[in-house]
Image (cartoon, coloured by chain):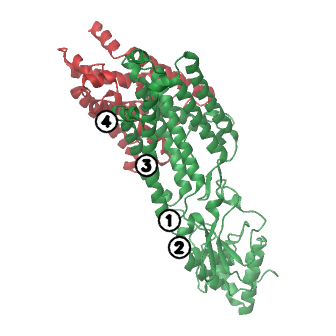
Amino acid sequence: MTRWTVLYARSRRLPAAIAFSAVAVAVAAGVWRLLSDDPVTPARLAVGVGLLALAPLIPTLSGDDDALESTAALPWPPRRAAHLVALFGGAVALLTVAAALGCEFGTGWQVVRNGAGLTGLIGLGAALTGAQLAWLVPVVWTGVQAMGAAAAAGGVGRQLLFWQLQPDGSRAAAVLAAALAVAGLLTYAIRGCPRRSPGEATVGQ
Amino acid sequence: MSGPTLIELRRSNARALGLVVAVVAAAWFAGQTGHWLRQWNWFAVMATSAMFVLAPLALAGGAMLGRRDGRTRADELIGSTGRPRWQRVTPGIAALTVATTVAYLLVLSVAAVVVAVNGSYLGVAGLVSMLVDLVVLAGAVWVGIGVGRAWPAPMVPPALAVIGLVVQLAGDTIIGPDGSATPLAALSMLVQPPGADWETASGAAVLSRLALGLGLLAGGGLLTVGASRPVRAGGLVAVAAGVAVTMAVSPATASSPTNRIDAAAQRLVCTDGGPQVCVTAVHAYLLPSVVPQARAALTKLAKLPDAPTRVVEWHPDTVGTGDDLDYLGDTPTTEPGTVFFRLDLADQDVDTDVEASILNGAGTTANGCRLQHPDALWAAGAWLAGGDTLDVKDFVFGLKLFPDDYRPVLSTLRQAPATEQLRRVTALRNAANACRTTDLTAILTGKSAA
């Protein structure tokens, strides 16, 4: 299992992605601490950095040739589920370390809630559009939330649209994040990424 | 468009990126409050703010194309052909740039038609601002291609998109110890709405975005086309130079005005025939609703000696500071024979109390003076209206000039002989129009000799 895990991690370029993610969060935290005395970052910046921790890891949800990979007689659904959960755990761990070092990108619950929801959204995207485009909806949705943050407070509709910016007590945001997490986890675990033709995989688009 | 470019349009991610840009831009405009539907300058600001998300998407889309040759290890093969590198990469760059900018232009064009149909002003200033946004968008595409080519890893597109977002968010949210913005603020495409419909982005604001766009274009071009390390390093220098100029020029960091007055937007549009009523070009579409109210007010103001014969929408020659009271002072800005009024379109499409707001203070509430004694102003308006009330709802320059109980003043005024009532209201108007605003109630109740 250990050897398989190492090979799997290498085949999915996980070491480089994890390193990039860690460096990106460290730079963001460093810039914040350099320019501000407050350990708590604004909510808008926090959601951006939360996505920054996950973004480099998104392409690891797919290999160079998923069709070839699937020929291995292994139970893939639990492995895919574990991969997605590991992404969530890695991002949360990075932000937790940053908080421990004096730069809080949201409360503990917000980090977990937003991380789970975003990971689920990424899993959904990977299963439906492929890992190469799974970043699209999370980036747009997070960007829209950051743009319209002033309108984040309000009824259930606004809480759902701006779910990453909601305070800890928002039930709507928590439910949406949980729903995204479960849907993404199940969809990606069961379905995996859509198979690309060998030619398309070679082109890498 | 050349054959290779058309081929790249079909086989690359150009059309997909164009579609994404168009959908996101359209959704952004559709999700905004309705004011931009009629106001060109508001629309231009919204278009700039859309770059907050569109530019990161363009970065990522460019990176997806840029990493193609490196990822497929086709660089060496293609490099063995006899053509220079720029000839080989130009079709791909052109396809992605054309698809992205044309898609965005299509959305802008549709929105411009909406503004033209619903509003009354399309100006050059807003158009220039939007065209500069296009340079930034194209620059983001080019830098994305360049970075994707330099580092063809799968994580580059998403990472680049999110870095684009986070850099802007950092600029928006990080504030220096003295409360001032950091240089990063210059890189954020999120723009505050203008203080008034006739305000547009200042020259510095447009210039800073242009510098950023040109820096990205030059840097992205060199990174993509450069066949040697020095040239590619020059690309990084070009991006850095663009960013540096942006930071130096941007109003966010240079403490210069973000907006300026768009003189063309303030051009007066007046009625023909009958007492003249003028509104600014940005509000000309409201003339049909304003004219009857304004003329009714003129008729009632005619009770007073030296009554005005012309109504003009108030418009300042300075940009708003966020506090409407800053428009007011101790020097009147009146014109003989003209009464000014202020259109209030906050939370409403049509100003329904133009007549009452003109009569309020006997036509003095938009004369540039910091008025006091709202009960006297209100009572004078009610007296002119001939009833027991004056149906003013809007705040005027942030002032509540509609007190809850003005009746005592009106009652006292009406107890005087008719000629005395007329004299007092005229005296109030003359005092208010001279910015002598400290004893308006006394004038109206006869306790002042004025």
Q: Where is residue B80 drawn, in percent x and y?
A: 42, 15
Q: Say which quarter of the image contains residue B283.
A: bottom right
Element class at badge 1: loop
- In the depicted structure, whether residue B404 falls above or below residue B423: above
The vertical placement of B397 against A49, above or below, is below
Dot 3 or dot 2, earlier in sequence: 3
The answer to whether residue B58 is above or below residue B110 is: above
Where residue B106 is drawn, which disc sits there? 3
**Tags 2 and 1 touching, CB below 8 Å:** yes
What color was chain B assigned in the picture? green
Q: CA distance from mark 1 to mark 3?
A: 29 Å
- Horizontally, is B55 left or right of A77 in the view? right
Residue that mark 1 sits on = B348
Badge 1 density bin: few <14, some 14–19, many ≥20, Cα 10 Å:
few
Left or right: residue B85 versus residue B244 is left
Q: Residue at x 58, y 59 (%)?
A: B197
Q: Quadrant of residue B339?
A: bottom right
**Whether residue B195 can be seen here:** no
Q: Position of residue B279 (x, y in %)?
A: 61, 70
Please tell me how crowded label 2 is: few (under 14), some (14-19), or many (20+) other residues with Cα within 10 Å.
some
Give the SS element for disc 2.
Answer: loop
In space, the residues marked 3 and 2 are separated at their CA atoms by 36 Å
Amino acid bearing label 1: Gln
